[in-house]
Image (cartoon, grey):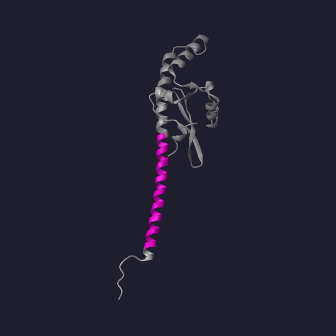
Amino acid sequence: MKNNKGITLVSLVITIVVLIIISGITANLSNDLIKQARLQDLKTNMLLIQAKAKTLAEEVNFETANLDKTKEEHITKINEIKGTKLIGTALETSSEEVKTAASNAGLTETTDYYYLSEENLVQMGINIKVPEGAYYLVKYSFEDTEVVYTKGYKYEEETYYKLSELNNIE
């Protein structure tokens, strides 16, 4: 009688198939975790910008609280204070490239929005590496400060640009 010790071809194939299935499941789960981490990273960056923007908007509101927004000389003073306190470049005076990116991100009303360069972000105390062709925009407002990332975040065939939209993604 022959006494073969070892594994059969069938058991080897079954083992390989099981390992392939496990690796496929693991790869899919890890992709989901990476996407979730990217979303959380983007939301964290945008929340940091929003917090600093609210602080700056609050400083402007505090300094301009006693000024009449209907008088020309007070409007000039308000604009001076905004120019010294608010960080960034008003979107209306930004480059065409930034304006186009803002338009592509769905911004139609750009009056109160400012473009934040990497230098502006550092000035705010936020160290973020902004990818080429992407921009952070902020609407300085005490009531509804909004942050926009012009590159957006793709989720289930939809692209989201605003922090308020990203907060609804789980």
Q: Considering only vertical position in the picture, is 77 above or below 57?
A: above
| Residue 120, image x, y percentages | 50, 27
Residue 59 sits inside the magenta stretch: no
Residues in magenta, as a range = 12-41
Q: Considering only vertical position in the picture, is 20 above or below 167?
A: below
| Residue 63, image x, y percentages | 49, 16
Nearest the eye: 158 or 61 = 158
| Residue 67, image x, y percentages | 54, 14
Outermost residue, top direction? 73
Nearest the eye: 66 or 36 = 36
Q: Magenta-highlighted stretch: main secondary structure?
A: helix
| Residue 133, image x, y percentages | 58, 36
Name the side, left or right, on which 98 lies relative to 121: right
Q: Considering only vertical position in the picture, is 123 above or below 6?
A: above
Label count reads 0
The quadrant in which residue 99 appears is: top right
Q: Residue at x 47, y 60 (%)?
A: 25
Q: What quarter of the picture does the N terminus occupy?
A: bottom left
Q: Residue at x 47, y 64 (%)?
A: 21
Residue 17 sits inside the magenta stretch: yes
Nearest the eye: 93 or 68 = 93
Q: Residue at x 35, y 84 (%)?
A: 3
Outermost residue, bottom direction? 1
